Image (cartoon, rainbow, N blue to C red):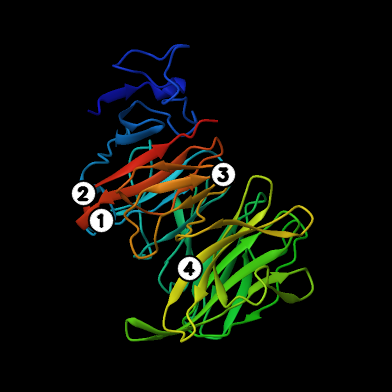
Amino acid sequence: MSRCITALLALGLVAGAAVPATAGTPPSLPPFDQSVFDATMTLERVEPHVVRVIDDGAGHDLTDLNTFEDLKPVSLLAAGDDGSVWMTSSGGFTRIGTRGEVPDPLDTFLAQMEIGPDGTLWIADGYRGSSIGEWRDGAWTIHELPSTAWVVWMDATPDGRLDFAWRDETTLTFERLPGSDGDGVLLPSPLRLGSPDGSVAVERTADGRTWVAEGRSWLEGSRYTRFEPGPLWSFDGTAWHAVEPLGGLPVQPRDLAVDERDRLRVSWWEVAPDGARLGPSYLTRRGDGGDWSIFHDGGWIDLSGADDVLTGDSGRDWCTGYTRFDGQEPTHYLEGLCLRPAAITPSGDIWVFGHKRNRQDPGVYVISPER
């Protein structure tokens, strides 16, 4: 049976039974990122290396449905380089462990969030949003884009700028806020897209390359009627090039992530011969020398993690918890919970929002893998 514990996190230590942790703290509750837990929080141990945040110590009850975004419940998390963790909440955005709530000026649906190194919160609507909000020094600045724009990627840079990409039915366009060059990094040229409704994922590696996973598909009403193989694009500073690590296999790339060694990971779904559905999935990794290897096979791959692969067992049933796959052995957490993509702090703690089936009992969980 789970037991509730009070964590004296202002000290960056986890306590058991309201007693401060000592050198004998169980390995299932390692110290968390002190910069995140800057107040006394109430945690519940749910399994080894996993706790649930019951209360963040700043007036936010993370077991109350009314805390979370809308009443679906749906809540998304983002972690910043400064160690902060932000959450979409019923009235806008909440920095966990900090009192109050930042109102949502764009009435976003499934908001995208990006946290700058200086703590700036950048937001965009995750569903065909054509504006970007910038929360800095206690005030919002709204940056308007063309009405046909849909922001699909944001990357806050060390110099306080934001690089972002937006798409319409035909083109993926890259821009920067403010508009002048930042640190001499050139933005990619526009990329022509092969379908009006397909998925687009963007990542950038430390060598300056920009990568785009284009999953081509066609939508009629609320139903996808056709899929076709799509390319993984790479921009080398001059032009876009299609990359096919799986050879002639009829696949389309779906998700991208960059691990702690700056190696690109790409998940792929196989396209059925009739184009009516997506089949088995694959995961590839780009090596230090530019070579590719198949990293994992089978099941839907969620590449939310910066340094690990988090995967559900099936794209058709995402209420299967998360699996951390580090390239050696998979480790399963929170079996049976329906979990959203993760936010990973610089210390490696994995924050997820999840709930039971039928959207019952929503909550925020923190996974601290054995280091």
Mark 4 residue type: Pro
Which element is circle 2 on? helix
CA distance for labels 1 and 3: 30 Å
Q: Which residue is mark 4?
A: 280
* Res. 187 visible in picture: yes
Few, some or many residues within 10 Å of mark 2 (<14, 14–19, 20+): many
First in residue order: circle 2 vs circle 3:
2
Q: Residue 180, position in %: x, y?
A: 70, 65
Few, some or many residues within 10 Å of mark 4 (<14, 14–19, 20+): some
CA distance for labels 2 and 3: 33 Å
Q: What number of labels is visible?
A: 4
Say which of 236 and 83 sits in front: 236
Q: Quadrant of the N terminus?
A: top left
First in residue order: circle 2 vs circle 1:
2
Q: Residue at x 46, y 53 (%)?
A: 311
Q: Which residue is mark 3?
A: 326
Displayed quadrant of residue 249: bottom right
- Badge number at residue 65: 2
* Whether label 1 touches label 4, CB < 8 Å: no
CA distance for labels 2 and 1: 7 Å
First in residue order: circle 1 vs circle 4:
1
Q: Residue at x 30, y 57 (%)?
A: 74
First in residue order: circle 2 vs circle 4:
2
Decide: is 2 above or below 87. above
Q: Which residue is mark 1?
A: 73
Decide: is 97 above or below 222. above
Circle 3 or circle 4, nearest the eye: 4
Q: Quadrant of the C terminus?
A: top right
Which element is circle 4 on? strand
- Badge number at residue 277: none
CA distance for labels 2 and 4: 35 Å
